[in-house]
Amino acid sequence: MIYTAPRLSQMTRVARSLASIAPAAALITNPVFGAQANPEPGVDAAQVARSLLSIPLNKGLFDVEHQAHVRAIDAERHIQFDDLYLYAPQGVYKPGPRSSTRFFVDHFAAAGLDQPRSGQSLCDVGCGTGAIGLSAARRGWQVLGTDIDPSAVRAARRNAQANGLEARFRAMGGSLLTPAGDELFDVIVFNEPLYDGSDGVVPLSADVADLHQMFLDQARKHLKPGGMVLFAIANCSSMAGDLGIPERCGWQAPRVIAADFDAHTRYARVLVAARASMS
């Protein structure tokens, strides 16, 4: 059963009840809220997000589900993602209905990404198949996708061509924003790979906060004035519940875009946007 909370006050009550992991929480499989959807006076979206992220992950159940994702990554597949037809080679992340890719793209409008002005640019860091970047290109963004995996870069280029988006989407190989050279962007999106396939509960980075700090340090050098970054924070990493990392890295307090929660595994994630502080 899916619970949808159109108002943040409702989500606050849900978060408080879930924090104690009451038996009734098992009836709620995926409550979702959009931070910009009918906000009520006096409701703190960041506090709601912190409440969700403070719920302890059920690592055993989460690992079982994650291993199913790992098995999917091991296979070559062709995927339909909205109106995109994507090729995903072996070893490259496959965007599915409950994937982080889906989570990002479903909240493009809440993040203000649905209607770019002419010439606005976006960088999709860790682009994989290119699903997020190609979804942005379909909406009119000029996109650079970067990925450290050559197979992902080749797949993203192939997918851009197959979907008629090669004029608005490029893919380059390298770590984080290194391939961008001196380019500046209006928006930088980072759909971080949290887990090593060899162990579903070990972060890919020894400290996920370090990976976010590296990303934010690089992103600062590649944003146009007034630009923003968009990334997710989840309770399955070493920075669980830590909405303060952008501020500690010299950014403005992040704006909560959306969050969701799976009561079965107790997996919570929050999509945030942040802008660099003026020096």
Image (spheres, grey):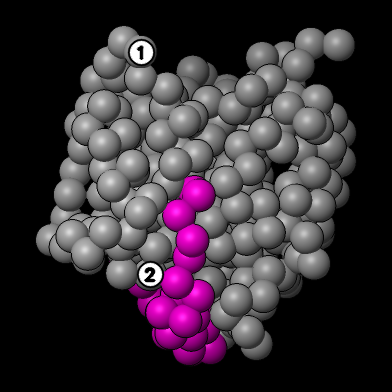
Q: Is residue 250 above or below residue 16?
A: above
Return the mark for residue 265: 2
Residue 221: percent from left, percent from top: 84, 30
Residue 252: percent from left, percent from top: 68, 20
Observer-nearest of 12 and 40: 12
Return the mark for residue 11. Answer: none
**First to last magenta residue range:** 53-80
For label 2, the SS is: loop
Whether residue 13 sits left or right of residue 159 in the image: it is left
Q: Amino acid at mark 2?
A: Thr
Classify residue 269 as left or right of residue 92. Answer: left
Mark 2 or 1, nearer chain start: 1
The quadrant of the image that shows the C terminus is top right
Q: Nearer the viewer, residue 184 or 58?
A: 58
The residue pinned by badge 1 equals: 42
Q: Residue at x 29, y 28 (%)?
A: 8
